[in-house]
Amino acid sequence: MKKSVLAFGALALGVAFSAPAMAADVSACLITKTDTNPFFVKMKEGATAKAKELGVSLKSYAGKVDGDSESQVAAIESCIADGAKGILLTASDTKGIVSSVKKARDAGLLVIALDTPLEPADAADATFATDNLLAGKLIGQWAKETLGDKAKDAKVGFLDLTPSQPTVDVLRDQGFMMGFGIDPKNPDKIGDEDDKRIVGHDVTNGNEEGGRKAMENLLQKDPSINVIHTINEPAAVGAYQALKAVGMEKNVLIVSVDGGCPGVKSVKEGVIGATSQQYPLLMASLGIEAIKKFADSGEKPKPTEGKSFFDTGVSLVTDKPVSGVKSIDTKEGTAKCWG
């Protein structure tokens, strides 16, 4: 039974080898939400390059779609069976996967959450991530300052990730509210707010088609909507397409998080007003370094001083800067982008 489960995991996920299995004593796994989102593509590039540099044998896995936790569980089982020293994980279900992570840690593997903290965060040995709450606050502050006095009468929609509300989704969503001046109520939960400016929430699965459909749904609820927070840039592009189809693309301010090269281009073209740029290649390369260090010495990574995780940085990218919100323009954003 176990063999069949592992075989299914390998087939369903698609296993990519970055170095010959016999060429290194240290092996590691990278498990991402998908292998199509440019963010995770760049993460894989960073992990692969660093693994090659350090002589680490790397296997990469990905879910079939964002939210595919079952495939991630199967991948963890494969990594344990293969004798990996560590796992880099971007979890689709940040609560549901904790028991599998515990199994890996009990087997002696170092487990590092990348980008998306687990629930609870200390279920992993460490988290290497953007400060996603800050990323949300930056675009919220920018949107508020851009609208000026009109912010108090704004009609705001939220294009979130999945119904399971993974931590990265909650942090960006609630961070935006804090930056915009909306009381998020329980900051660990999406959807309990009572601010009259909120039109509603919908989910996108982090892709363009999901963003388009979610935007259409919110437009049906309130066609006067004029501010959209999106979980990532593919969802933002989908939202723009839906708005353009009804001639509203110039009436709605869209903000996002990611900072991929296509997203920065969308900012430059005016599709997205501002985005918070993350650095996935750095997350993954640092993760591989940490696994190698753990394999060599048993030492585990430490968080950034004053934080509960290792902060890999975030920058607001916009060509329309506002007072009081530090930002970089699309020229600098392009120099730092990925994908």
Image (cartoon, grey):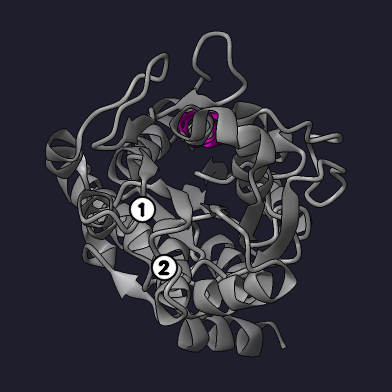
Residue 124 shows in this picture:
no
Q: Residue 240: which numbered mark, if any?
A: 2
Q: Amino acid at mark 1?
A: Ile
Q: How many marks?
A: 2
Front residue of 60 and 43: 43
Q: Residue at x 45, y 68 (%)?
A: 248
Circle 1 is placed at which residue position? 272
Disc 2 + disc 1, Cβ < 8 Å = yes
> Who's the residue at 84% across and 43% down the image?
193
> How crowded is the residue under tag 1: few (<14 C-alpha within 10 Å), some, or many (20+)?
many
Q: Is residue 329 above or below residue 75?
A: above
In this rendering, the answer to whether 193 lies above or below 311 is: below
Q: Does 267 sit left or right of 130 as displayed? A: left
Which of 259 and 185 lies nearest the eye of the viewer? 185
Question: Which of the image's four quarters has the C terminus?
Answer: bottom left
Over which residues does the magenta segment extend? 136-142
Residue at 49% x, 35% y is 147
Q: Position of residue 196 (x, y in %)?
A: 81, 45
Res. 274 in view: yes
Mark found first going from the N terminus, 2 or 1:
2
Up/down of 182 relative to 237, above or below: above
Q: Amino acid at mark 2?
A: Tyr
